[in-house]
């Protein structure tokens, strides 16, 4: 008889590949709170709706290495390393590269995939959808609607009411707690 733990490895591999196919990165720098990126980033704004189109050399100057890796190189953080994944804080998640509002905490759910998951974006223009056929898979990449930063992927195995699961790298998310919100 084959031990159950051996049989579960293919399932674990499939779950990891669904959300991640890039080399793993350390999640030690992941933060929910503000970091120095915004202070040194002239395009970061939570109110500006204008599109951001910078050369890669400029992005590299203004983003921290971990944010640059995810946002511009389409990287993936290690699963289960984001403090945002299990956060129950009430508020709004923003693109850490440009400040665009992306998701409300009310749309966040525990998917068990190892990355923060949401069932819908904040608005229709928050997210861009791009076919991603890399790594021998057919997926849909999600990007920031303002700066085209890579956020993660969307899958059709989420909860109601949308049935979608936006599997997002916590490194690219900036969070602001709602005033008066309770934990």
Image (spheres, helix red, strand yellow):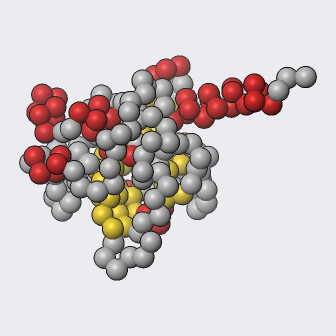
Seen at 11% across and 51% down, the residue is 39
Q: Residue furthest front?
A: 28
Q: Position of residue 73 (x, y in %)?
A: 30, 28
Seen at 34% across and 80% down, the residue is 180
Q: Residue furthest top?
A: 136
Would residue 85 be found to the left or right of residue 56 on screen? right
Q: Against 50, is 58 above or below? A: above
Q: Nearer the viewer, residue 182 or 122?
A: 182
Q: Residue furthest bottom?
A: 180
Q: Position of residue 9 (x, y in %)?
A: 69, 27
Q: Quadrant of the N terminus?
A: top right
Q: Nearer the viewer, residue 18 or 16?
A: 16
Q: Against 89, is 86 above or below? A: above
Would residue 82 be found to the left or right of residue 3 on screen? left
Q: Against 37, is 105 above or below? A: below
Seen at 29% across and 31% down, the residue is 69
Seen at 64% across and 32% down, the residue is 12
Q: Quadrant of the C terminus?
A: bottom left
Q: Position of residue 165 (x, y in %)?
A: 53, 48
Q: Position of residue 6 (x, y in %)?
A: 75, 25
């Amino acid at each position: 008889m084959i031990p159950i733990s051996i049989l579960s490895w293919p399932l674990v591999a499939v779950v990891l590949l669904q959300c991640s196919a890039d080399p793993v990165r350390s999640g030690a720098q992941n933060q929910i709170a503000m970091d120095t990126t915004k202070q040194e980033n002239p395009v970061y704004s939570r109110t500006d709706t204008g599109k951001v189109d910078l050369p890669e050399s400029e992005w590299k100057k203004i983003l921290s290495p971990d944010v640059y890796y995810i946002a511009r190189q389409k990287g993936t953080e290690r699963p289960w390393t984001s403090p945002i994944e299990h956060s129950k804080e009430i508020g709004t998640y923003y693109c850490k590269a440009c400040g665009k509002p992306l998701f409300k905490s009310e749309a966040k759910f525990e998917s068990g995939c190892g990355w923060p998951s949401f069932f819908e974006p904040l608005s229709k223009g928050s997210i861009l959808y791009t076919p991603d056929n890399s790594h021998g898979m057919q997926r849909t990449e999600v990007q920031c609607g303002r700066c085209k930063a890579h956020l993660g992927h969307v899958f059709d195995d989420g909860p109601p009411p949308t049935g979608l699961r936006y599997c997002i790298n916590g490194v690219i998310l900036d969070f602001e707690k709602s005033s008066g919100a309770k934990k």
